[in-house]
Amino acid sequence: MTAHPLVVGTAGHIDHGKTALVHALTGIDTDRLPVEKARGITTELGFAHLELPPFAPSEVAGRVAVVDVPGHERFIKSMVAGAVGIDLVLLVIAADEGVMPQTREHLDICQLLGVRRGIVVISKRDLVDDDWLALVTDELRAFTAHTFLAGAPIVAVSAKTGAGLADLKATIARELAALPPRPTAGAFRLPLDRVFTLKGFGTVVTGTIASGSVKNGDELVALPRGLAARVRGVQIHGAAVDDAGAGFRCALNLGGVSIDELVRGDVLAHPGAIAPSHILDVRFRLLPAARALGKRSRVILHHGTAQVMASLVLVDRDTLAPGGETIAQLRVDARTPIAALPGDRFIVRGTVALAHHGTTLGGGEIVRVLASKARGAARDAHADHVRRLADARLSDRIALEAKSAGAAGIDLTAVAHRTGQTPADVAPIVDALVAEGTLLRAGDHAIHVHATVVAALEAKLRALVEAAESSSREELRTKLSPALARPAYDAIVDALARRGAIIATADQLAKPSPKASLSPDELALLDRFKAWALEPLRPKEIGAPAALDRLLAAKLVTKVKPDLYVETGALDSLRARLIAHLDAHAEITPQQWKDLCGTSRKFSIPLAEFFDAEKLTLRVGDIRRKRGR
């Protein structure tokens, strides 16, 4: 047996033959509950495995998992839980009925959850003639035209006679082979969809591994409550294995926890790897069939296999029209946070069914976990920050997370929590950001503070020292920022002291007095540099190398390039104007930079290159952006 980390799932309206189709394909009856057999409908998730023979060398052959979902609108909770982790959906539509309300809702759910590929299956082929089948096929082409199933294969089958089943299996194999591989990195997460007990084994749970991997003997926690458990056995498709990775449906035999303590919706993870969130920044899309939403709506949130109540809060607008997309926040009760990670998909539902559609309102993608509430006048800036996060590469995302952490900084564990990676995955990226100057690392516990935050803290500390003449080192720390960790404060003080900007002792900080030791000639030259501002004479034109060296040593003049020296105060003022411009506009054009400097290209170009070398700006083509954006 060759097992694949692939999951095939059904979707479609009640009584359109999903369970019968799974039985015909796999030989397994997924209706396992007495009530399902008595009523003839699926009320809970069903599970099977499908053996795919080798149709062609390029196609998937072997065993893949199958999830059968209920079609009744009252069991959407179970349907969404089953749709999580599906790689290929079989959208089942009965030939004698065509598109029905749950057909629409299930298709919307699959699209919002980011299901990667699908096949449209016309079931009950034996109940209609060829002309009717052609009409249904045309209807389904139009129905799926603007969805991820546009152009998807359409296969007509009969579970009763077996017609079309071989063609469907071959099509499944082809579609699975065309899927790109799942990412395998990241923290291990297993959203639970079943919890039960087996005689001689004890507690058994099943689910589709969302990310990472698990092995026999691992210590785990069940989130959000943090219950400890130990893996006593791992199975894939009923066969014992040593480990299992992302994309596999697996069963874990757990020790240390009873079935009464676990429920569907819990997430298994390694201890400390994931921090559950109750405020999430998201990109949200409202379905065209839904009603317009106001600023705040009470919704049912589906994430993974969990269902919780939440408030959906629009961040940068007061209403959202049907079909619209926006940045929003999901705020979950602090007692029932969810084990979410950036990139996860979610669904929100209302409590009143929409005409001919169901209760699904929309869904989207989680952008940031462990978020803070977007409030008042800062809402627009919050939304812009979330949009930048959503489109950022991992290294840029880490820099942005550090920047939003402000003076408190961020450690490696927090970086991992906020990105969904393991500390080992993000460590080399953080090291590179430190090496290039985007992050300042301080202390044994490696607190990382963004360079722009450091620059602002340095400016504030210098101002405090200037105003105080001399003051207690500890007193100035408390004035600087209550959130600033002592190691980061010490690193900032040491950096300023090395540059001669302050005088630091073990207990006191004081401002330097370089002018006191300058000669009259040196003071006169300093006055000339102040008058020149950003357009000084060249060193060979000045003709006072010794005096210039004294001003450089006193940090009163800064070397921009070998033949360009600028008074440090003028350079600091330009730096402050540049940072303010980049904070407001994210980038600066050559003309804007020339206007900001107020100089000719002879001086503006080397000044721009100086800030590039200082790691404040990054040149991209003709424009420059702040590092970390």
Image (tube, rainbow, N blue to C red):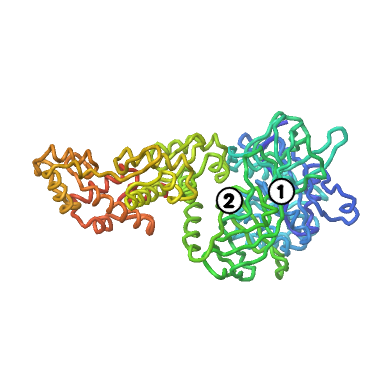
In the rendering, which numbered label is found on residue 369?
Answer: 2
Disc 1 residue type (three-letter): Gly
Q: Is residue 165 left or right of residue 211?
A: right
Give the x, y percent position of residue 568: 24, 47
- Badge 2 amino acid: Val
Q: Is residue 580 left or right of residue 279?
A: left
Quarter of the image with the N terminus in it = top right
Look at the numbered disc 2 and give the secondary structure of its residue. Answer: loop
Query: Do tag 2 and tag 1 residues touch (Cβ < 8 Å)?
Result: no
Q: Position of residue 227 (x, y in %)?
A: 73, 41
- In this rendered view, identify the residue nearer to me: 600 or 6: 600
Q: Residues within 10 Å of mark 1 (few under 14, many from 20)?
A: many
Marked residue nearer the N-terminal end (2 or 1): 1
**Is residue 182 among the parts visible in the rendering?**
yes
Q: Quadrant of residue 147?
A: bottom right
Q: Is residue 167 visible?
A: no
Q: Which residue is mark 1?
A: 9
> Residue 424 shows which numbered tag?
none
